[in-house]
Image: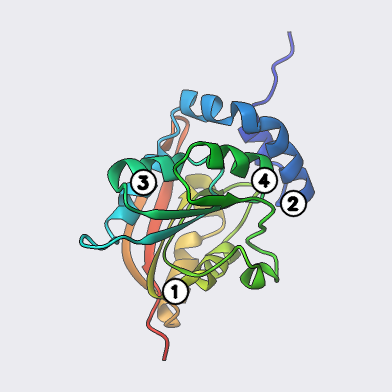
């Protein structure tokens, strides 16, 4: 009997091809939660805990979840901080539709390409004080250039928390990219975890950056 490769592993071979990623997630969306949770996908929980550390204690806040998928991060954030306003963005309309169905998000919008030159002018995309990105900076999806795109969606003096699957982080030198951004004054590194839990077969690096106040 032939062994069928997991959708997650197939996605890692797509070299950031937007059309192919959209097609894969269209088909995978109904089974995504079952598949990744079965495989020990703990990254949404850890990412949510890290962004929660940046949230104010005495007021509501808006969190922009970039690459929200089916809403695993949003559901965890709502569990620990029920008063949040959550906005989800995803490349896949089908994945975003499932995120909307969870009730965790005020809205989740599909057809949003983080690396598109027009993303910053899209009416659905507004900079937020708290931006989170879990599972999107990974093999076959987005490289270190995604950090700058995420910072562009982070309001001045706001925080950005993101995960990077371990082998992708090391192969593409995400730590070096973060260092260059901080040395250049584009951000301050406030916390980092290296080779922390991510999914059963592999860990990840996690970073929280603060964007400086606009001059």
Q: Nearer the viewer, residue 47 or 86?
A: 86
Residue count near mark 4 (Cα–Cα under 10 Å), binned few <14, some 14–19, many ≥20: many
Q: Nearer the viewer, residue 167 or 63?
A: 63
Q: Earlier in the sequence, mark 3 or mark 1?
A: 3
In the figure, is residue 93 to the left or right of 146?
right
Q: Earlier in the sequence, mark 4 or mark 2?
A: 2
**Residue 74 point in image, percent of width and height:** 43, 45
Query: Distance from label 3 to label 2 (Cα)?
Result: 28 Å
Extreme residue in the left direction: 58
Circle 3 residue: 77
Secondary structure found at label 1: strand
**Which quarter of the image is occupied by the C terminus?**
bottom left
Residue count near mark 2 (Cα–Cα under 10 Å), binned few <14, some 14–19, many ≥20: some
In the figure, is residue 3 to the left or right of 80?
right
Q: Earlier in the sequence, mark 4 or mark 3?
A: 3
Circle 4 residue: 92
- Marks 1 and 2: CB-CB under 8 Å? no
Q: Earlier in the sequence, mark 3 or mark 2?
A: 2
* Vertical relation: 89 (above or below) 70: below
**Which quarter of the image is occupied by the N terminus?**
top right
- Which label sits in the foreground, 3 or 2? 3
Secondary structure found at label 2: helix
Secondary structure found at label 4: loop
């Amino acid at each position: 009997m032939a062994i069928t490769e997991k959708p997650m592993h197939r996605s890692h071979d797509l070299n950031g091809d937007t059309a192919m990623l959209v097609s894969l997630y269209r088909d995978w969306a109904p089974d995504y939660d079952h598949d990744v949770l079965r495989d020990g996908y703990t990254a949404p929980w850890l990412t949510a805990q890290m962004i929660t550390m940046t949230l104010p204690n005495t007021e509501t806040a808006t969190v922009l979840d970039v690459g929200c998928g089916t809403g695993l991060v949003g559901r965890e954030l709502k569990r620990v901080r029920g008063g949040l306003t959550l906005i989800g963005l995803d490349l896949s309309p089908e994945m975003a539709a499932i995120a909307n169905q969870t009730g965790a998000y005020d809205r989740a919008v599909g057809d949003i390409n983080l690396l598109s030159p027009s993303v910053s002018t899209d009416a659905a995309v507004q900079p937020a004080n708290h931006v989170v990105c879990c599972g999107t900076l990974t093999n076959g999806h987005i490289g270190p250039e995604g950090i700058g795109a995420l910072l562009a969606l982070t309001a001045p003096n706001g925080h950005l928390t993101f995960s990077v699957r371990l082998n992708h982080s090391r192969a593409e030198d995400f730590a070096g990219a973060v260092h260059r951004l901080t040395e250049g004054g584009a951000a301050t590194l406030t916390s980092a975890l290296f080779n922390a839990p991510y999914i059963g077969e592999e860990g990840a690096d996690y970073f929280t950056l603060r964007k400086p106040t606009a001059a």
